[in-house]
Image (spheres, rainbow, N blue to C red):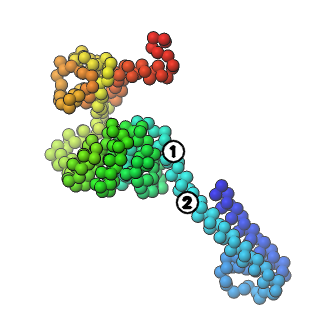
């Protein structure tokens, strides 16, 4: 609609110049060339005010008056149409990016799109994990990410970002105060949500934890730790980064929770198909009580609710994840999808 108005403004301007050229040529007679008439139409319509090509008689001045009025009106119409197109294109772009958020499920919400937020988005995109960005700043021109322009401390903005359907949230806003308010807002909306927060000062850690953050990370401190490890153990750091990103090796790390009714629950690592059939290594087991068993023995029993920290081929990890999920939940989802129970089928 707005583009149509711009086209109309262009056609109207061309019509004014064409009509003015024809009128000057007819009124002033053979003494004026076509270019003289066109040049006079241009300087009159744009109200530039250069000297007349030839002295105008009364009829020529009447033509000049109408050309000036038509030119000014057309110019004003064109400028307002272009301004509306610029404003409306931004609004429509916001709507298009926000529309992509509504289709996300089990995604992550990134609050803040600075250097840290951009790096998080890059990493999640490399991991093919769904995510949405919330930022008070305008998205970059080339940005095609699911994006919500708004204040992350506002409950309504977080709802637009799909916090009810989200898997986790990370807040990396510019100040600790903004991150605290975002954590408070997110925790009030989703008491069970995984929330990771950035802090710039050590004193902000306790406040963010009290506000409801599950993890608080100081990028400067963490960056210093990694750089120190690179100095001391460069090969180990390279290996962990490549495995974590899924590059350089055909293995990756994953954490898998053993659900209720899983065939893995109650089995020892030796009897389970984890190593034998899936070629997956269990590096640690996180118990329900919070304790962690590193490098578990083959006699270690897998229990319901355990979180297995595993390493292996991505296909084997996918199969292990399917085994670890609750069979009851799987049947419930299958029955809901077909309208029949397992026994009825």
Q: Which mark is residue 99?
A: 1
Callout 1 secondary element? helix
Residue ID for mark 2:
87
Image point (43%, 53%), residue name: 150
Q: With respect to residue 112, does 258 lie above or below?
A: above
Q: Which mark is residue 136?
A: none
The mark that comes first in sequence, 1 or 2, is 2
Callout 2 secondary element? helix
Number of other residues with Cα within 10 Å of mark 2, as a class: few under 14, some 14 to 19, many 20 or more:
few
| Mark 1 → mark 2, Cα distance in angstroms | 18 Å
Find out whether the residues at labels 1 and 2 contact each other: C-beta distance under 8 Å.
no
Relative to the observer, which residue lies in front, 253 or 221? 221
Q: With respect to residue 309, does 198 lie above or below?
A: below
Image point (21%, 51%), residue name: 221
Image point (49%, 41%), residue name: 102
Residue 12 in the image: state x and y as whole percent: 72, 66
Residue 128 visible to an observer of this rendering: no
């Amino acid at each position: 609609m707005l583009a149509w108005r711009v086209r109309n403004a262009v056609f109207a301007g061309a019509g004014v110049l064409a009509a003015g050229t024809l009128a000057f040529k007819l009124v002033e007679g053979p003494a004026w060339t076509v270019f003289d008439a066109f040049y006079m139409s241009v300087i009159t319509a744009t109200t530039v005010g250069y000297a007349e090509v030839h002295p105008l008689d009364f009829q020529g001045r009447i033509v000049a008056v109408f050309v000036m009025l038509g030119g000014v009106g057309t110019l004003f119409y064109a400028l307002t149409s272009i301004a509306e197109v610029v404003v409306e294109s931004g609004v429509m772009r916001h709507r298009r990016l926000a529309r992509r958020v509504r289709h996300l499920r089990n995604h992550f919400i990134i609050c803040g799109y600075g250097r840290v937020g951009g790096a998080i988005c890059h990493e999640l995109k490399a991991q093919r994990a769904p995510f949405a960005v919330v930022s008070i700043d305008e998205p970059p021109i080339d940005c095609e990410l699911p994006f919500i322009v708004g204040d992350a401390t506002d409950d309504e903005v977080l709802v637009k970002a799909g916090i009810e359907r989200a898997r986790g949230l990370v807040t990396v806003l510019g100040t600790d105060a903004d991150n605290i308010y975002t954590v408070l807002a997110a925790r009030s909306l989703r008491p069970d949500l995984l929330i990771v927060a950035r802090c710039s000062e050590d004193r902000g850690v306790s406040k963010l934890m009290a506000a409801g953050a599950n993890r608080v990370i100081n990028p400067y401190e963490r960056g210093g730790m990694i750089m120190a490890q690179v100095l001391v153990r460069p090969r180990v750091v390279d290996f962990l980064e490549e495995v974590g990103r899924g590059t350089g090796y055909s293995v990756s790390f994953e954490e898998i929770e053993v659900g209720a009714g899983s065939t893995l629950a109650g089995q020892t690592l030796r009897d389970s198909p984890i190593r034998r059939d899936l070629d997956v290594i269990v590096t640690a087991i996180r118990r329900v009580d919070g304790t962690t068993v590193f490098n578990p023995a083959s006699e270690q029993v897998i229990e319901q609710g355990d979180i297995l920290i595993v390493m292996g081929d991505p296909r084997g990890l996918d199969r292990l994840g399917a085994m670890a999920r609750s069979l009851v939940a799987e049947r419930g989802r299958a029955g809901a999808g077909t309208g029949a129970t397992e026994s009825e089928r």
